Image (cartoon, rainbow, N blue to C red):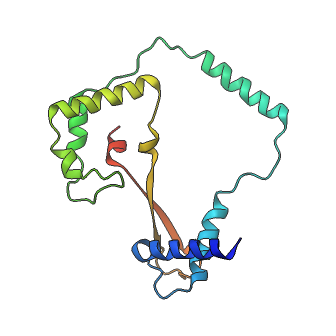
């Protein structure tokens, strides 16, 4: 890996580390080792797949989707259900990465809730979960009584958007 890329990664990790994983007084190599450990956790499978296996999986998936009964409508949700879920949101919690404060969700008008309900029902009908609601903000917390020098000593927590939780 080129040195300038390593420096960018270290700078980025240290910036995040101050806010989330608190790698205080740690060397840049600790940040880099944390990054490398996380990167290695999400590597592609190095084994080659046989074309026969891939075609069998594709046939099975296509058969499943072709045999689905598409005439059944999904269970639609009502604005009252959306309102009851919104009421469960804690207004004091921090704003999500989508920038919508919890207090703003709690004071939505009935017309706005109805529009959200229409969007949710359309997504249910299309069997679609919007990509923007799939985004999560990952925080790293150190495990108690663990050596903070090792990347395995941290546990990730993903924060999802409240709109995605309502959906």
Residue drawn where x is 61% and y is 15% of the image? 67
Splitting the image into 4 quarters, where does residue 120 fall?
top left
Horizontal placement of 17 versus 106: left or right?
right
Q: 100 or 69, which lies in front? A: 100
Residue 31 shown left or right of residue 104 in the figure: right
- The image quadrant of residue 3 is bottom right
Picture quarter containing residue 92?
bottom left
Which residue is at the far front? 4
| Residue 75 shows in this picture | yes
- The residue furthest bottom is 25
Picture coordinates of residue 45 (x, y %)? 74, 51
Residue 48, how many percent across, how many down? 83, 46
> Does 140 appear above or below 72?
below
Location of the N terminus by quadrant is bottom right
Where does the C terminus fall, quadrant-wise?
A: top left
The residue drawn where x is 25% and y is 35% is 82
Query: Where residue 122 sits in the image (x, y, percent)?
Result: 38, 25
Q: Residue furthest top?
A: 71
Residue 106, percent from left and from top: 18, 45
Residue at the location (33% across, 29% down)? 119
89 lies above or below 68:
below
**Do we see residue 151 in this rendering?**
no
Q: Residue at left 57%, top 72%?
A: 8
58 on left or right of 102:
right
So how many labels did they put on this image?
A: 0
């Amino acid at each position: 890996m080129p040195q300038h890329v390593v420096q960018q990664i270290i700078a980025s990790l240290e910036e995040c580390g101050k806010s989330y994983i608190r790698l205080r007084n740690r060397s840049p190599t600790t940040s880099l080792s944390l990054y490398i450990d996380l990167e290695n956790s999400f590597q592609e499978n190095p084994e080659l797949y046989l074309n026969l296996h891939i075609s069998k999986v594709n046939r099975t998936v296509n058969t499943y989707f072709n045999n689905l009964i598409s005439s059944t409508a999904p269970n639609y949700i009502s604005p009252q259900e959306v309102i009851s879920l919104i009421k469960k949101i804690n207004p004091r919690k921090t704003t999500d990465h989508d920038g919508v404060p919890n207090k703003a969700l709690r004071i939505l008008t009935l017309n706005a809730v109805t529009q959200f309900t229409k969007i949710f029902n359309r997504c249910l009908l299309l069997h679609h979960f919007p990509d923007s609601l799939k985004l999560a903000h990952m925080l790293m917390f150190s495990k108690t009584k663990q050596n903070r020098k090792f990347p395995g000593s941290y546990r990730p927590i993903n924060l999802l958007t409240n709109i995605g939780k309502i959906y």
